[in-house]
Amino acid sequence: MLMSSSDKAATLIYGPNGFRVVRPGHFVVCAMSGIPVHLEELRYWSVDRQEAYASAELSTRRTLEDL
């Protein structure tokens, strides 16, 4: 069975002002919750960890883990 790019996660490189698509797809998986986040809705990520987050709360929680 053929899979379309909407059926698989994208691979991204996260930068300070945006991200670059390395492998096409329509979503990434939140590093904290495992929830799929559509690329159009992706607003939170860590450049240092190269991780995506589904919400500001999850991003903040992940950051506080290092303190």
Image: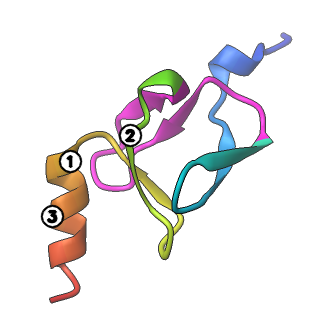
Mark 1 touching mark 2, by CB under 8 A?
yes
Q: Label 2: which residue?
A: 43
Label 1 crowd (10 A; few <14 / some 14-19 / many >=20): few
Q: Are marks 1 and 3 in contact (CB under 8 Å)?
A: no
Mark 2 vs 3, N-terminal side: 2
Mark 2 vs mark 3, foreground winner is 2
Q: Nearer the viewer, residue 6 or 49?
A: 49
Q: Is residue 58 above or below residue 1?
A: below
At label 2, counting other C-alpha atoms closer than 10 Å, the crowd grade (few under 14, some 14-19, many 20 or more) is some
23 w.r.t. 39: above or below? below
Q: Which residue is mark 1?
A: 56
Q: Residue at x 53, y 38 (%)?
A: 28
Question: What amino acid is at disc 1?
Answer: Ala
Of labels 1 and 3, earlier in sequence is 1
Tell me the magenta residue range.
23-39
Q: Is residue 4 magenta?
A: no
Q: Position of residue 26 (x, y in %)?
A: 62, 23
- The N terminus - image quarter: top right
Real-space CA distance between mark 2 and mark 3, rounded to the nearest whole angstrom: 15 Å
Residue drawn at point x = 15 percent, y = 89 percent = 67
Q: Residue furthest right?
A: 2
